[in-house]
Amino acid sequence: MTIERVHGEGSWEETIGSARAVAAGDRVVVAGTMPFVDGVVEGEGDPYEQARVAFGHALAELARFGLGADSVVRTRMYLAHARDVEDVGRAHRDRFGAAPPAATLVVVSGFADSRVLVEVEVEAFRDVTGERS
């Protein structure tokens, strides 16, 4: 089995020694993704917008492997506040409603940057057999 690792532009990758995304066989995993754009928190104070941006970044990483939102089989959403469940859930539904993945949503005690309200992870399936379904 071949393992492919891709790196992004985030400073955390170098700091903690991680890859942005890893493909192993038929599985592609995208690391925790936050709503940063050019070092700035996009949608500061707006959990829907932060989730929308973070999912957009995660899907951009999947696109590097030729995959889209319909390939996502699992998502994880980490929220700083329980009050944001509905907004983040709406962003998730807006992005994946046509092909909903298994999803986990948890409230955490916070993030390394206090302006961040949400971080997301995605896992996708890719057909490595070459067969069409």
Image (cartoon, rainbow, N blue to C red):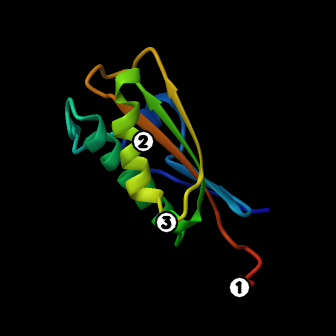
Residue 81, image x and y in percent?
37, 21
Q: Name the N-terminal-most of marks 1 and 3.
A: 3
Residue 3, image x and y in percent?
69, 57
Real-space Cα distance between discs 2 and 1?
32 Å
114 shown above or below 94: above
Local SS, label 2: helix
Local SS, label 3: loop
The residue indicated by pointer 1 is 132
Q: Amino acid at mark 2?
A: Gly
In the image, what residue occupies the spot 49% across and 65% down?
98
Real-space Cα distance between discs 2 and 3?
14 Å
Give the number of the mark in front: 1 or 3.
3
Label ID, residue 98:
3
Local SS, label 1: loop
In the image: residue 14, left or right of residue 113: right
Real-space Cα distance between discs 1 and 3?
20 Å
Q: Name the N-terminal-most of marks 2 and 3.
A: 2
